[in-house]
Amino acid sequence: MAEISLRQKIEEKKAVIAVIGLGYVGLPLAVEFAKKGFLVIGIDLDKEKIEKINRGISYITDVSSEELKKVVMKERMVGFTDYSQISRAQIAIIAVPTPLSKRRKPDISFILKAAERIARYIRRETLVVLESTVYPGTTREIILPLLERSGLKVGKDFLLSFSPERVDPGNKRYKTGNIPKIVGGIDKKSTQLTRLLYQQIINKVIPVLSPEIAEMAKLWENTFRAVNIALANEMALVCNRLGIDVWEVISVAQTKPFGFLAFYPGPGLGGHCLPIDPLYLSYKAKLEGIETRLIQVADEINSQMPHYVLGRIEKILHRAGKRLSHSKVFILGITYKKDIPDIRESPAIEIIKLLIRRKAKVSYFDPFVKEIKIGKKVFHSSPLEKRVLQEQDCIAIITDHSLNYHLVVENASCILDTRNALAKIKGKIRTRIERL
C-alpha cells in the first residue's frame, strides 16, 4: 500500500474527508477539518440536516452558523445524502448513533449500514475510522469483515482504526481541538496515519496498541461516571430519609484533598453516553460469561430516579392537601443537560410520561425546546412568567438552565429542586422548597 501517498495528502491537506453522520459528534468534527483546509464531504440520510448544512445553518450548539457558513462558502464543506460520494474520499469517518434497542441491548445497526455502504464505494489507499461508541471487538470482528467484502484487504489496500468520540455538548472549556484523542488501529500503519490525521486538528493525540484498548477506554470512562452518579443518587435517597441535606454533605466531603471526587445526584441520566455506554460493556462481558453486577445495579438505580422524582412530587402535593391526579405540575427544563438543546435520553421526558399516567396536568418551560411530542400529544413550552408560575400546584426543576430563578421562587407555591439550582437564592423565602 502506498502509505507515503496518503501521508502526503494528509500533511498537505489534500486528502478528501468523508464524515458519515452529522450529529453532535460528526458536525463539529467535519467543521474542524474544513477550517484547517481539508475538503470535507458530510454524509447524512436526514435531508433536513443536509439542506441546513449547505445553507450554512447549524443545528448543533457547539458549531455556530457563522463558522459553518464560512467553510461552506469557501467550498471546504458540502453535505450529501448520497453514500456514493465516499468514492471521492481518501478518509471515511463513521460518527453515526449507537443507541440501545427496546430490550436495552446494543443497537449497532447504524454502523453496520454505514460500513456496508462504505464497502460499496471504498477505493484503495483509504483510511476508515470508526468514532461511534461500540463494545470491544466491534472494529476488528464486525466492521473489518464488512469492509473486506469490497474485495480489498486491510493493511494492503485500506487502513482501519477506532478513535472514540469524547464530545461534551455545551462545554465551553473543552471542545474538539483541546480534548485528547485516543487512536487504535488494526495495525501500525493504521494507527500512525490515524494519529497524523487527528493531529491536524487536535492538540494531543494518544496512540494505543489496538482498537480494542480504545473501545474499552471509551466505555470505561463513561461507566466510571455512571456508577459514581448511581452512588450519589443512592446517597441522596438515604440522606432524604435521614433528613440530611445531600448537597451539603457533598460540599463538605469534597474538601478532602485526596481520595474523593464529587459526583452529584439528579433526576436520572441523560444524553447519548452515560445511560447507554455501560450497557454496551455489560453486553460484551455477558457474551464472555462475565456478570457485571456493579454496572447492572448502577443502571437500576439511575433508571429508577424518574420514579423517585414522581414520588417526591406526590408527597409534596399531599402535604399541601392535594392529590397528584389533576394537580398542575410544571416542569422546568426538558433537555438532559444545562443550556443545550439536546433531549436525548432526557429524564424529563420519562418524568412527564409518569405524571401523565397518574393523570397530572403537566406543562413545561424550556428555552431550548419549543415543543415535544410524547405519545400522541404535543406539548408546547409555556412562557416563564408570573401568571403561569402562580397557577401551578408544584414546580419541578429537572434541568438547571440559566434562568431567572428569583422569578420562579417568588411566584411558586412549592418547588422540588432536583439539581440544586436554587442554592444561591438568599434572603427570606416564603415558597416551600425541597431539594432532591
Image: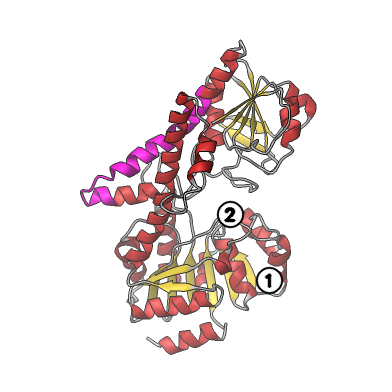
User: Could you say which disc has been placed on residue 31 in the image?
Assistant: none
- Where residue 343 appears, as percent x and y from the top left, is 58, 43
Magenta stretch secondary structure, dominant: helix
The kind of residue tagged 1 is Val
Name the secondary structure under disc 2. loop
Residue at mark 2: 169
- Where residue 303 appears, as percent x and y from the top left, is 43, 35
- Where residue 126 appears, as percent x and y from the top left, is 44, 77
User: Could you say which disc has been placed on residue 71 in the image?
Assistant: 1
Toward the viewer: 410 or 299? 410
Viewed as shown, does residue 47 lie left or right of 191?
A: right
Name the secondary structure under disc 1. helix
Indicate the quadrant containing the N terminus: top left, top right, bottom left or bottom right.
bottom left
- Residue, x 37% and y 81% (percent of image)? 189
Mark 1 or mark 2: which comes first in sequence? 1
Above or below 208: residue 234: above
- Residue, x 33% and y 82% (percent of image)? 156
- Residue, x 40% and y 43% (percent of image)? 101
Above or below 108: residue 15: below
Which range is magenta? 285-311
- Where residue 425 appears, as percent x and y from the top left, is 70, 35
| Magenta stretch holds residue 152 | no
- Residue, x 41% and y 80% (percent of image)? 192
Q: Are marks 1 and 2 in contact (CB under 8 Å)?
A: no
